């Protein structure tokens, strides 16, 4: 929509209005970083053993180490098994047990004893999510990712229909209610259900706030708006490491990150709607009102005639999800973006949820990962310097190579693995930010939110699968990194098929996504044809003018040779002045000139 682009330039592409909007967008994204990764700490695994107090009934004075030695079988690396215990012999005395012991093992019968040196309480310790119930902890993470999937499926099309602003407000309300409610759940099933709602609300906030910022920003500042909102998300991860270090009870941690969401009730009065979306939906008066408000805040004066352009927009094309697959170019772009978002989420959360495997201190590793995510701010310069396509492929390749190189390090070399994990996290974080910018620029406005919702759904499918891969890692340690690295390298090659969008105006209608070369050739051909037609008409006008001047001179000579009585009629009526032309010549010339001007106007319009 070139007209809207002109209006946005007049209003201000990144003035005080857009800067205020960026702050409003970054604040919710900060809390999304807290909520989305909080379960790294609230659901952290801790050291645990079977409860074996039965032996204390025989000998109450046993030391803790001797009690474990007599009741638990030895596991790997000299440690005790966490899910097995020796079959109790309550009818024997302690001397017999020390002498003969027991050779048969059984599953834990009286529950578990947890190490509380690091965490006072976690989901694992409160709901016994260990041994055969260990998969429930991963299930809760998958439900959170499934909530992200459902949120993208639901809130993307709803935002295209009802607007970005109301969906953001609804998502913030759901985030507050479900986040606070999760801190008071009496059982784990209810916690899983609320995690689903939390995930759905996070999805609604993330995809709609970044689109809102993109549609209000000028061509040169779209990358800045998107990347800075992602840096706010990384800031949430950094703060999460500090909060989790200071608050070791999972319910208090959940309350701490959820209660401040009540501040976002003020967004009812301060969050604007997307003027670009309003125009595409035909709400011209509302769009004009928002644009005038933005111009006032930016201290710009916008000509009324320029604003009136939005009142004369062409017909509004109501697009649907199927429009993303109707044209070959848009279909190819959509399928590649679906793949990019799927792999981005699959790898990003695979690394984020596996933070305990990359170092000895979970808090320090989480802090490093958060700082690495902040480095995605350099994407602003890289994306503008090298373009979207090269950066997207390069970031995917960096992460893929780092994941495969991690397989070359033996199990004991934690420092080398941590360094490569940092590079992998940097690559996938930058790739995710690039995908957000790239997708917003590739999808037309009429289906932008639907398209973002679609690719976001594919990302959430990747997030749903990630915890299940973590379960396979127990039996196949090299499987996750091998899958990550291979998929990333293949996908980086597919980025070559995407068009470049740097410093280009956002498309508004799906018909603008036809073949770029065809459009340029057609435009050049039309201009050339119009130029030739104009030159031809100009030549005809010059020839006609010369002909009329020649006829006028000939008539003047005839008048002078016939004397002053020429032109006077026989009935006494006065004739024309000597300087006038023959009426027949004048009328024919006027008709010819009029037709020529009409053709010229038509050629210029085309």
Image (tube, grey):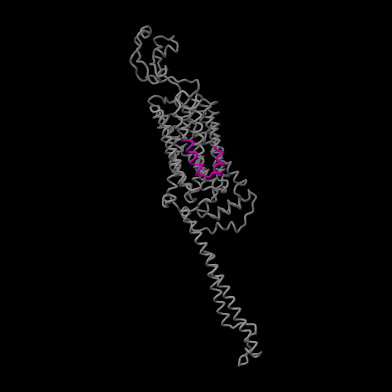
How many numbered marks, from 0 up?
A: 0
Q: Percent x, y for residue 22?
A: 58, 42
Residue at the location (59% across, 49% down)? 13
Please check the rendered image and state whether residue 390 is part of the magenta-colored stretch, yes or no. yes
For the point 56% across and 82% down, which residue is it? 584
* x then y, percent, for residue 505: 54, 51
Up/down of 344 relative to 502, above or below = above
Taking the magenta stretch, the answer to whether it contains residue 251 is: no
Q: Is residue 2 visible?
A: yes
**Residue furthest left in the image:** 104
Determine whether 97 is above or below 134 in the image: above
Residue 514: where, in percent of width, then height? Answer: 46, 54
Q: Find the magenta span and give its range.
A: 376-400
Q: Nearer the viewer, residue 552 or 172?
A: 552
The single residue placed furthest to the top in the displayed view is: 95
Percent across and percent down for residue 378 are: 56, 39
Instruction: In this rendered view, identify the residue nearer to me: 473 or 237.
Output: 473
In front of the other: 315 or 511: 511
Question: Residue 139: in sight, yes or no?
Answer: no
1 above or below 72? below
Residue 301 sits above or below residue 49 on the image: below
Q: Main secondary structure of the magenta part?
A: helix
Residue 375 sits in which quadrant?
A: top right
């Amino acid at each position: 929509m070139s007209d809207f682009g002109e209006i946005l330039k007049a209003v201000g592409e990144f003035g005080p209005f857009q800067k205020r909007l960026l702050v409003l967008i970054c604040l919710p994204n900060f809390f999304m970083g807290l909520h989305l990764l909080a379960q790294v700490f609230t659901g952290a695994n801790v050291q645990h053993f079977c409860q074996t107090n039965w032996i204390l009934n025989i000998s109450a004075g046993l030391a803790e180490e001797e009690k474990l030695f007599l009741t638990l079988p030895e596991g790997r690396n000299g440690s005790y098994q966490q899910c097995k215990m020796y079959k109790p012999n309550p009818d024997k005395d302690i001397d017999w047990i020390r002498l003969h012991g027991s050779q048969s093992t059984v599953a834990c019968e009286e529950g578990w004893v947890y190490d509380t040196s690091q965490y006072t309480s976690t989901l694992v310790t409160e709901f016994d999510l260990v041994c055969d119930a260990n998969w429930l902890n991963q299930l809760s993470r998958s439900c959170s990712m499934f909530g992200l999937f459902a949120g993208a499926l639901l809130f993307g099309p709803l935002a295209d229909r009802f607007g970005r602003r109301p969906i953001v407000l609804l998502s913030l309300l759901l985030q507050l209610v479900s986040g606070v409610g999760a801190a008071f759940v009496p059982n784990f099933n209810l916690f899983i259900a609320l995690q689903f709602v939390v995930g759905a609300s996070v999805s609604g906030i993330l995809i709609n706030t970044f689109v809102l910022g993109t549609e209000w920003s000028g061509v040169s500042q779209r990358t800045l708006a998107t990347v800075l909102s992602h840096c706010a998300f990384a800031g949430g991860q950094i703060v999460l490491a500090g909060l989790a270090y200071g608050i070791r009870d999972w319910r208090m941690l959940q309350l701490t990150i959820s209660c401040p969401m009540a501040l976002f009730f003020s967004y009812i009065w301060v969050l604007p709607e997307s003027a670009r979306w309003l125009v595409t939906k035909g709400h011209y008066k509302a769009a004009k009102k928002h644009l005038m408000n933005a111009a006032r805040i930016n201290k710009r004066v916008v000509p009324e005639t320029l604003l009136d352009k939005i009142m004369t927009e062409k017909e509004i094309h109501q697009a649907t999800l199927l429009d993303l697959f109707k044209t070959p170019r848009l279909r190819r772009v959509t399928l590649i973006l679906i793949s990019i978002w799927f792999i981005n989420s699959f790898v990003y959360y695979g690394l984020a949820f596996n933070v305990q495997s990359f170092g000895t201190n979970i808090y320090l590793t989480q802090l490093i990962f958060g700082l690495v995510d902040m480095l995605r701010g350099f994407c602003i310069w890289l994306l503008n310097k090298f373009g979207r396509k090269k950066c997207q492929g390069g970031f995917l390749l960096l992460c893929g190579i780092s994941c495969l190189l991690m397989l070359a390090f033996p199990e004991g070399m934690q420092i080398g693995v941590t360094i490569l994990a940092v590079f992998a996290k940097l690559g996938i974080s930058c790739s995710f930010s690039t995908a957000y910018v790239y997708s917003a620029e590739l999808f037309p406005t009429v289906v932008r939110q639907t398209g973002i919702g679609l690719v976001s759904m594919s990302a959430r499918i990747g997030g749903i699968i990630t915890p299940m891969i973590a379960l396979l890692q127990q039996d196949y340690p090299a499987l996750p990194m091998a899958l990550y690295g291979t998929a990333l390298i293949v996908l980086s090659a597919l980025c070559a098929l995407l068009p470049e969008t740097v410093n280009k105006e956002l498309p508004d209608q799906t018909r603008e996504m036809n073949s770029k070369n065809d459009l340029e050739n057609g435009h050049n051909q039309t201009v050339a044809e119009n130029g030739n037609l104009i030159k031809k008409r100009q030549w005809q006008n010059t020839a006609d003018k010369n002909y009329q001047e020649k006829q006028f001179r000939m008539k003047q000579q005839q008048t002078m040779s016939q004397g002053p009585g020429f032109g006077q009629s026989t009935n006494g009526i006065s004739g024309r002045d000597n300087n006038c032309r023959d009426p027949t010549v004048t009328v024919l010339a006027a008709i010819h000139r009029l037709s020529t001007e009409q053709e010229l106007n038509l050629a210029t319009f085309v």
